[in-house]
Image: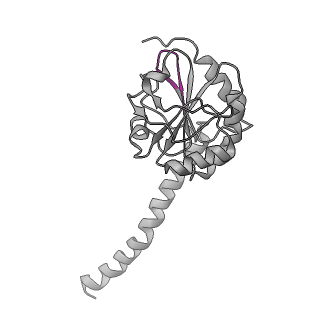
Amino acid sequence: MSATSTSAPVRRSLLVIAPVLVFAALALVFFIRLRSGADPSAIPSALIGRPVPTFALEPLPNLVGGEGQAIPGLSSADLKGRVTVVNFWASWCAPCQIEHPQLMRLAREPGINLVGIDYKDAPENGRRFLSRSGVPFQAVGMDSTGRTGIDFGVYGVPETFIVGPDGVIRDKLVGIVTPENYAAVLQKIRAAGTVARP
């Protein structure tokens, strides 16, 4: 028997075993991560503890609030002076539609400054969505290109940032605000009222 004929079965065996070993290694990593007690929805943000990125976004055209007032655009300068909740959303985002009633609830909380950034959305679609579902935001900026989202480190919508009165990002919430996590989110917002230490 030649060396070539014995090496062919060995290669075939390796081709069968290698994917199984890779899968087993990945499964082990995922299992350890799940059992570690870490929150799987917690995605770290390099911006926590840092000032919000500089931006200036135009308003959604013809968007009016519940009392008929025009809803203004949004800039980084608007995020100073009080705790502000910045919600990245889009009309095409199904989880955003599920989250929306909780944002309407949050907007009714006293002392909450809730603003929105319409992420990679057609302006007419964003306006139509808010006109139909309600406008929880005191200001809405259009981020049609996604540049502001990139600067904030947005992975996908919805994502919510809690900004302290000093313009420093205090926390990042990935995923939707739900009835189950609403109290914890509200507690994080209230806790951001103190000025961050450098």
Spot the residue most to the left: 3
Q: Nearer the viewer, residue 29 or 183?
A: 183
The residue sitting at 65% across, 33% down in the picture is 68
Task: Give the quarter of the figure containing the N terminus.
Answer: bottom left
| Residue 12 screen position, x and y as percent | 38, 77
Find the magenta span and give its range: 161-170
Spot the residue most to the right: 179
Q: Nearer the viewer, residue 191 or 110?
A: 110
Q: How many numbered tags mark residues here?
A: 0
Q: Is residue 103 visible?
A: yes
Quadrant of the rendered image containing residue 105:
top right
Q: Is residue 9 above or below residue 82?
A: below
Q: Is residue 194 above or below residue 16?
A: above
Q: Nearer the viewer, residue 53 or 26?
A: 53
Is 164 included in the stretch rendered in magenta? Answer: yes
The residue sitting at 66% across, 35% down in the picture is 103
Q: Is residue 49 visible?
A: no
| Residue 145 screen position, x and y as percent | 40, 46
